[in-house]
Image (cartoon, rainbow, N blue to C red):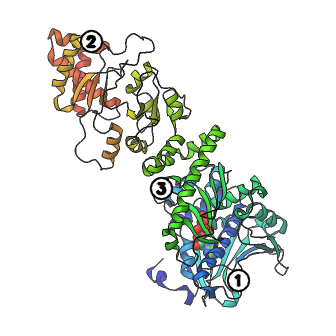
Amino acid sequence: MSAEEQSASPDTQAPQSRTFEADVAKLLHLMVHSVYSDKDVFLRELVSNAADACEKLRYEALSHPDLLGEDQKGAIRITLDPDNGRLTVADNGIGMSAEEMIEALGTIARSGTRAFVERLETAQQAEGSQLIGQFGVGFYSTFMVADKVEVFSRRAGSQAANVWVSDGKGAYSVAAVNLEDAPERGTRVVLHLMEDARSYAEAHTVERLIKTHSGHVPVPIFLADKPDAEPREISDGAALWARPKAEIAAADYTDFYRGVAGQFDEPALTIHFRAEGRQEYTMLAFVPGSRPFDLFDPQRKARMKLYVRRVLISDEADLLPGYLRFMRGLVDSADLPLNVSREMIQESPLLAAIRKAVTGRVLSELEKLSTADAGAYAKVWDNFGAVLKEGLYEDFERRDALLGLARFKTTSSGGEWRSLKDYVAGLKDNQTAIYYLAGDDARRIETSPHLEGFRARGIEVLLLADPVDSFWVTSALGYEGKPFKSVTQGAADLALIPLLDKPEEAAPDVSSAVAAYLAFAKSTLGEDVSDVRASERLTSSAVCLVAPEHGMDKRLEQILAGAGKLEGALQKPVLEINPRHALVARLAAAREAGADLPFVESATRLLLDEARILDGTVPADPAAFAERLSQVLSRSLG
Ligand SMILES: Nc1ncnc2c1ncn2[C@@H]1O[C@H](COP(=O)(O)OP(=O)(O)OP(=O)(O)O)[C@@H](O)[C@H]1O
């Protein structure tokens, strides 16, 4: 589009053709040609947009009551024209100006669009239909059933109206229309249905869809079976959350959840309660049954709606902390003042009190689910555990509650989730800490040599593979009086816990030859290490690296260094050597004999590089490493 076209105002110009933003065009193509099998969703999306528009107007009318005029009550009117294959959804909501139509219906405003489109391209049918709505692609779904879509709109209070038209194939146009051709206020979306989608112009199909998918939107819906037929009310717009719980069936909650969350699955947990007393409000919120694809997008906002006495104040209200950003639903307050701005409501101490209470309630409902249905809770943790763990370092006040909710894979859990309560119940005699191993790859950390001595003693170790783990675990004080301790840091202190197969031998004996070799290794490796010592944690491997006792755990150091956030130089690691290992014994003997010290020195340097490789890093000097390796190999071949 040229700059000239961009700046022209459609309110005063002839129709202008514009091209969709590249991602929209790609998205439309994917949607129309392959991904979605469930075409019915378009109607839910149109109704939900119409209801949002009515609610936005109610909010604006708080400060500008004249916007409502004679037409006070929000309504959605669906008109069918079976003879011509048309379906029209009209609302008397806020409406859109020409610029707003270009912005809302020609681009995708949300972040992460490219990632989304890429996901769609590779998605299977079923997954594809789950993705819709999670990303605000709602309106574009009309092109699955229509080969032409017209949107007539007049913004509340405006003396101009416009029409947006597109066949969904790459371009759209926006033009001014006469006021008599547009709704008096709000938006009318006209779908020219494709030949194979003409059933959407039949009353029984549309009525069934509205009742099953949109029966709980808080705006009444009317249906006219033909253009000149009298409209009848098919949904009364009573807010589901305001009804007594006893009258609400599970299926009603599911429909509502699907509408509010844009998901297609069942909610994993439904939380519906009314608080009375100092604060009066209702919460209806859901833990989704699956993980939205943009959960870790830093720009992703919480999607909780805030109502005040049934007036929608904000659909991205700051009602729950970031670590509960997967929750979907709403809070409707009876006490917040309606006559102040959205921003001031967000700042209000009353809202802060609600925020605190609903956060506590969500955590306690999760706790209840974890005891009532461990299997269902495990799925919630699978989907959202990595996000909930952010709360362990962000929400000091609720850290204990969150530690109680946390689940971990461990060296003895066989791939299942374990709670800290279970962990502590299984502590070995003399075990004083909760041990963990942090890394970036679940499978690799499970095979880490650092775990050998713990496994040999039957000590359970938490396997922490999420990046967030390295942060909370170093700031958490512990659980039930037991501190968290990394198995890659400091001395292992395992001497007091016997080996399972050799109960009499806890700490390895270090012969004088090995002790002398350790001292030799330390002076050989010099500045590359902070110490060399006999390992209690190794039983079969020869060497490993650990972090010094009073520094940072190695995983945390790696993450910070990777993000350029490490202050100062990397810490020098401690090289731990397994005194029981045959190779170590032979090196110690060779050193004692004093026969070929340069060779023992090379082998010692190779051991350090081996430890680095086991740690997932590379030898400090790859060329020297290769040289030493070939030297040692050729010598071993004679
Ligand atoms: N009937 C309408 N009245 C006023 N504005 C509308 C209407 N329909 C769509 N819009 C505007 O178009 C935008 C895009 O709608 P679309 O359904 O694609 O996504 P969304 O509603 O923002 O997201 P989601 O589908 O996740 O709720 C809306 O945010 C709104 O600004």
Instruction: Say what secondary structure mark 3 lies in.
Output: loop
- Quadrant holding the C terminus: top left
Q: Earlier in the sequence, mark 1 or mark 3?
A: 1
> Circle 3 sits on which residue?
297
* Disc 1/disc 3 C-alpha distance (Å): 40 Å
Q: Would residue 256 be seen by someone viewing this image from the given angle? A: yes
Which residue appears at 47% of the width and 56% of the height? 297
**Corner quadrant of residue 367:** top right
Assess whether mark 2 and mark 1 are in contact (beta carbons under 8 angstroms). Answer: no
Disc number lying in front (1 or 3): 1
In the image, residue 120 lies at what x, y percent? Answer: 57, 54
Q: Would residue 170 be seen by someone viewing this image from the given angle? A: no
Q: Is 191 displayed left or right of 469 in the figure? A: right
Which residue appears at 67% of the width and 54% of the height? 264
Within 8 Å of ligand 1, the CB of disc 2?
A: no
> Circle 2 sits on which residue?
585
> Circle 1 sits on which residue?
72
* Disc 1/disc 2 C-alpha distance (Å): 90 Å
Q: Earlier in the sequence, mark 3 or mark 2?
A: 3
